[in-house]
Image (spheres, grey):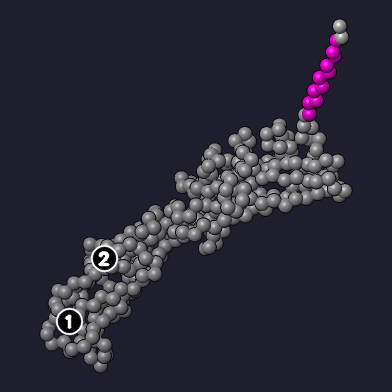
Amino acid sequence: MKRRIVFLGLLLLLPPAAHALCVNLAFGNVPSLVTFEGGSGGYAVYDPQEYLQTVSFEVRGEATGATCEYFVTLSAGQSGDFNQRKLSEMTSTLNYNAYTDSGKSGILKALPTATQNEIITGSFPVVVALTQTNAHKFFWTIAPQQVVPAADTPYTDGNLTLSLYSGLLFLSPTLEATKTIRFQARVDSSVDVSLVESGQRFDISDTTQLIDFGTLESGEQRGFDVVVRSNDGYVVTMQSQNQQLLIHARAPAISDVVSYSIIFNGGGIDLSTGAPVPVIAGSGTTPATGVSFPIEFTVGTLSGEETAGTYADVIYVEVTAN
C-alpha cells in the first residue's frame, strides 16, 4: 500500500513597520498663526461672499531604500467638534472649519476620527538625494454673514495641533512630529444707513429719498424709514441745509419760506440750528435686514401769501460707529 504525502505551503506577508520606511520626517515652514483675510481685510459680518484661506507647509524627510508614506492631521480646537470649529472673543463665537481641498470635500480631522479623505497624505519615493521636501496645503474659511459684535481683539482658536505620521492611516502609523497653529480673525466694524420707503428692509444702495408734497397744504404729511445695520455701537445724526425751512428756488431774491416739523422714531427733533444733531444711538448688533426708524415731515401753517414756485430743503443723515 502506497502512502501519498502532501505538502501544504503557507506564506504570510506582513507589512514592514511604518517607521522603517521613513527617516527623520519633520515639518517645515508651518505658520504658528494664520489670520483670516476677507474682502474688507478682516471679517465683515454682512458680506455674503465666502473667502477661502490657504495654509501652506512642508514635510521633509531623508532618502531611504523604500518608499516613505506619511499623512498629516489637525486637531478639533477649542470646540472639541471637528464638524464645527469655533473662534471666540469674550462671549461671542464665529463658526469656521478646515478642509483637505479647495472644494471642501473633506474636513481635516485627527486620529482616531479621521477617514482617508479627512487627512493630507504624501510620500517620498526612492531617490538619491539625502533630503526630500514636499509642499502641502490645506484650506479654511469662516461661514459668511455670522452677525457678531466688532471687537478690539481678534476672535481666536488657539493651540490647534498639526500632526505628522509615518505609515498608512489604518496600519498602526507612527507619530513623527507636531506643530501648534493658532487661527484668528479680526471682526470689522460695520455701520451703515439706508433710506427706504416705509416698511422696506435695509438696502445699501438706497441712500436718498425725495419727499414730494406736490401742491403745498398746511398740515400735509409725508415720510419714509431710516434703516440702520450695525454690529457696533452707533449714532445717527441729521442736519438741515436750510435750518429746517423750505426755501424758494429763487432765494435769496425771493425770501418766502415754509416751515415744517419732523417726528423721528416717535419723537420730535429740531434741526433749526443748521448743525448736526444726534437723533438716536444704539449698541450691539442688528440683523442683516437692519433696524427701522420711521421719520415723518409735516408742513407748517401757510399764510396764503407765499410766492408761487418750488420750495425745498435738504437733510443729511449720517451714521457713525460709537
Q: On residue 215, which mark appears?
A: 1
Q: Is residue 173 above or below residue 92?
A: above
Image spot of residue 266 (x, y percent): 22, 62
Residue at position x 73%, y 41% from top?
A: 70
Q: Identify the residue at the far left of this view.
A: 304
Lateral position of residue 107 relative to residue 261, left or right: right
Q: Is residue 56 above or below residue 218?
A: above
Please provide the residue range marked out in magenta: 3-13
Image spot of residue 270 (x, y percent): 25, 71
Q: Is residue 206 above or below residue 289?
A: below
Residue at position x 34%, y 73% from top?
A: 208
Q: On residue 16, which mark appears?
A: none
Residue at position x 75%, y 50% from top?
A: 134
State if disc 2 and disc 1 touch (CB < 8 Å): no
Q: Disc 2 designates what residue?
A: 198
Give me the C-alpha separation between circle 1 and circle 2: 22 Å
- Front-most of residues 92 and 48: 48
Q: Is disc 1 surrounded by few (<14), some (14 to 19) or many (20+) residues within 10 Å? A: few
Lateral position of residue 2 relative to residue 105, left or right: right
Image spot of residue 141 (x, y percent): 55, 52
Classify mark 2: helix, strand or loop: loop
Q: Main secondary structure of the magenta part?
A: loop
